[in-house]
Amino acid sequence: MIVVVCPGQGSQTPGFLSPWLELEGVSDTIAGYSEAAEVDLRQHGTLSDADTIRDTRIAQPLIVAASLIAGAALAARAGRRADGVAGHSVGEIAALVSAGVIDAETGMRLVGIRGRAMADAAAQTPTGMSAVIGGDEQAVLSRLSELGLSPANYNGGGQLVVAGELAGLDALATEPVKGTRVIPLQVAGAFHTSFMEPAVAALRDAVSTVSPADPEITLWTNRDGSVVSDGSQALTYLVDQVSSPVRWDLCMASFADRGITGLIELAPAGALTGLAKRGLRGVPTVAVKTPDDLDAAVALLNGEAA
């Protein structure tokens, strides 16, 4: 069983969309995606600097667009889709498109709304996020409770992303839990926490107009790592996930339980294959960062990898 995974915010670098625009038809696709998301994806994916594309309003549509383009190119070259799909954070929108729950235009419209709503929610209170590497998870969670912080991403492989007000994050960095390393992240908000409740309402309104289909391939949810077989339920989880923790650790555990034989991360790739190397030891992975990586991904998808 080969699984495709779609990355979340933080995976993009300046100009990462440029090589994909050289593929036939992608320029027109990006134009359509830009209109749906209300973001100039060509401009920001090729010319904008790191600070600009870090903006949640821009970053989220860019990431989803790149995943959709890479996924479509992979399926076309391989002559088939993967057996299953999951997305990390905003990557769940690309995953729903890949699974046939919603179409690409709807996905891009929703990610545009999601990005704007989360940016607006983040602007209400100065908050941020930090990665906590290593240490005892229960000890870390206890310390977060003392500081008024929340777990945001249970990433597995000894990595927990935490979020909350800046004073609490500063205190955690100043006095880290024994055995941990705290790395401040360049994001402008406490995503996947109660600070995002206003964004939940905005996305729920947008989703109310969507008529989803049931997944055509195995689809995992960040909610608890379970498989979702109902399209309406998948959309509900997508909305709720904005203010609740990403359980990528449970997704990887579910991958292992299913006995997956390979994992392919779509563009802008790197973060999730890195986690898989620690959380899914021995499972072959391919990070599709540019079109040059498609041949290796096709070989893995079609069982031809060495």
Image (tube, grey):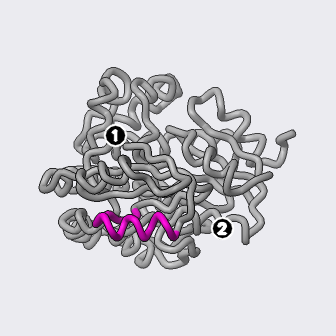
Seen in the image, is 285 located left or right of residue 42? right
Answer few, some or many: residues within 10 Å of disc 2's Cα (few below 14, many 20 plus, some between 14 and 19).
Answer: some
C-alpha span from label 1 to label 2: 28 Å
Seen in the image, is 135 located left or right of residue 104? right
Instruction: Find disc 2 in the rendering and name its residue.
Output: 253
Nearest to the observer: residue 178 or residue 198: 178
112 inside magenta stretch: no
Q: Which residues are magenta?
A: 138-151
Q: Nearer the viewer, mark 1 or mark 2?
A: 1
Quadrant housing residue 142: bottom left
Seen in the image, is 272 located left or right of residue 89? right
Residue at point 51%, 70% (across, down): 138
Quadrant housing residue 125: bottom left
- Numbered disc 2: secondary structure: helix
140 inside magenta stretch: yes
The spot of residue 275 in percent (x, y) is 61, 50
Instruction: Find disc 1 in the rendering and name its residue.
Output: 186
- Numbered disc 1: secondary structure: loop
Q: Which quarter of the figure is the C terminus placed in? A: top right
Nearest to the observer: residue 151 or residue 31: 151
The spot of residue 273 in percent (x, y) is 63, 46
Residue at point 68%, 65% (across, down): 255
Nearest to the observer: residue 50 or residue 83: 50
Residue at point 62%, 42% (across, down): 74
Kind of residue indicated by mark 2:
Ala
